[in-house]
Each structure stands twice: as structure tokens, then as C-alpha cells.
Image (cartoon, helix red, strand yellow):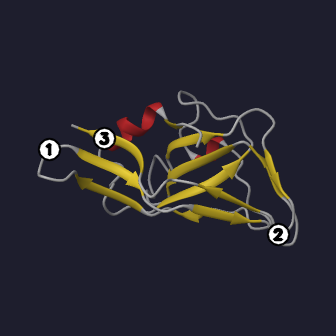
Amino acid sequence: MATFTKTHEFMNYLGLGKINLSTDVFKWSLTNSAVTAAGTQVMADITALSINGGGPKTATCTFAETAGGSGIWRFSVGADQVWTASGGVIGPFRYILLWDDTPAATPTDPIVGFVDYGVGGLTLNDTETFTLDVNADFEVFTIS
């Protein structure tokens, strides 16, 4: 799988209490808009794909202390996500964004980070699928 990159402002939003890792709803979206860790902070900064089955998918996220009461906390995503083109194509897309759909005030829809699948992007024809393989435990970050 490609590498996950956090946006620079995500940890700031977290520290300011604008994001709750335990209760907020996080989503995955596809985009071909250029995404960078320093410059892309909220969903309004990009154009997400929303047609033919390419819309946002709810992420299964966990924020929990690692085994044994170690004082190490992990925010992870624990389920693969599948997009299926239906009634047309999805794409092209290069990035898969993880974002917080909960905050109603600034920042609205902050981007946690992204996976970059490389130059050229991916296109799914009708009925084709794409799976974001998180290997049952995709660690977004650890606090220790």
C-alpha cells in the first residue's frame, strides 16, 4: 500500500480541541486535485469525486491505548474500503483523503491526511472496484 501522509494542520486542530478522535465521524474520499501536507487542510481546498460510486465512504476508526496500559495511544483505521464504479467511470483519481466530517465550525471538514497513488492516477470503468487495503490495522498516528 502507498504511504499515508498527515496534513500539517491536523495535529494543530487536534490540540486545539476542534477534533475528537473518539466521537467524530471520519470519511474517505477520492480526488485528483493536487494534495500536499502543508497546503491542503480542509475539504473545501480540493474537488472530491462524487459520481458513479466515487463518493465519500465512512471510515472505521479507533482511538485507543495499546495493550498493557503502556501510555501509548493509537488512532487507526481498521477496515478496508471498497469503491465500485456504478453507471459510469470513477476517476481519474490519485489521492485518497481521510477527513473529519463532524466539525460544524472552523475548520469545517478538516483533512487528517492522504494516500498518494502516484502520477497518472487511477480510473475505474463501470463495475470495476478499487480497494484501499488497510491490512486490518492502518495506523494513522501514535501519541506516546
Residue 23 place in picture, x, y as percent: 33, 63
Q: CA distance from mark 3 to mark 1?
A: 10 Å
8 versus 76 height, above or below: above
- Residue bearing the label numbered 2: 127
Q: Is residue 87 left or right of residue 142?
A: right
- Residue bearing the label numbered 3: 142
- Residue bearing the label numbered 1: 71
Residue at the farthest front position: 135
Q: Is residue 89 left or right of residue 39?
A: right
Instruction: Identify which residue is drawn at 78% across, 41% down.
Output: 121
Residue 32 place in picture, x, y as percent: 75, 43
Inspect the image, locate mark 2, and give the three-letter code of the amino acid beneath it: Thr
Of marks 3 and 2, which one's residue comes earlier in the chain?
2
Q: Nearer the viewer, residue 13 or 55?
A: 55
Q: CA distance from mark 2 to mark 1?
A: 45 Å
Residue 49 place in picture, x, y as percent: 74, 55
Inspect the image, locate mark 1, and give the three-letter code of the amino acid beneath it: Gly
